[in-house]
Image (cartoon, grey):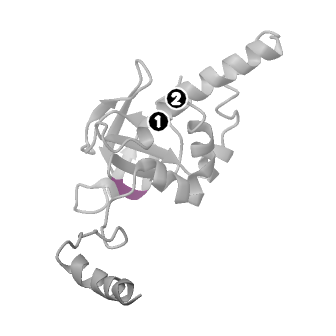
Amino acid sequence: MRFQLCGILALPLLALGEQIVVKNPITQQTMPTLADLLTIEQTTSIFYSYARELTSSNVFSDSGASPITLLVPTNKAVMALSRKPHQGPAPDIVITDEEFDSKSKENVERWVSAHIIPQSPIAFDQTYPTLLDGKTITFTQSKKGDTDDWSRAVIEGKVHIIGKREASNGVLFLIDGTIPSD
């Protein structure tokens, strides 16, 4: 019993020579991913509900990928659309439910892709291709203000950037309109 008690008391002393340093994850500051920002940004939940259903949205959570620029419309901007992203252009023909589901997914993929610029950072006086094949987005600067930054940027002559969030894998810009996919 005496040896057992000595062994128990000596254990902490033996461990002092072999201390393992563990970094405290709470004190380490890392930037969130675009997916993290979209998850907590309540004003863009409609865009993210469309986007997260697509395989292309995996890039939003991949902090090792090349940085991208997301132009994310507010819920108000999406709600103002006369036809929602999954609806696409007005149909001219009657289609089956299966064809409708397939077409809806294709429409959403096109719409979300039109809001993604595959590079970051960007300048606000240029034209950039989006992930939607053949679609480009042109940025201009509004006349007000003296700085050349995102707060003065106008997209396609009518959509304004109203907020900016930086992530480990790119930048998210909140916009007050949507980018047409046609």
Q: Nearer the viewer, residue 15 or 111?
A: 15
Q: Secondary structure at mark 1?
A: helix
Give x and y (percent) for residue 138.
34, 35
Against 150, residue 181 (above or below) is above
User: Where is 123 relative to 109, above or below?
Assistant: below
Return the residue nearer the eye: 40 or 111: 40
Q: Is residue 75 above or below residue 64?
A: below
Would residue 164 be counted in the magenta stretch? yes
Overall secondary structure of the magenta section: strand
- Amino acid beneath label 2: Thr
Q: Residue reaching furthest left?
A: 17
Q: Residue at horizontal 32%, vertical 73%?
A: 27
Residue at label 2?
Answer: 55
**Marks 2 and 1: in contact by CB < 8 Å?**
yes
- Residue 4 picture location, percent across and down: 38, 83
Disc number at residue 85? none
Q: Which residues are magenta?
A: 163-167
Whole-number angstrom distance, CA of label 1 to CA of label 2? 6 Å
- Residue 70: give x, y in percent of width and height: 41, 43
Query: Is 8 left, or right, of 176 in this rendering?
Result: left
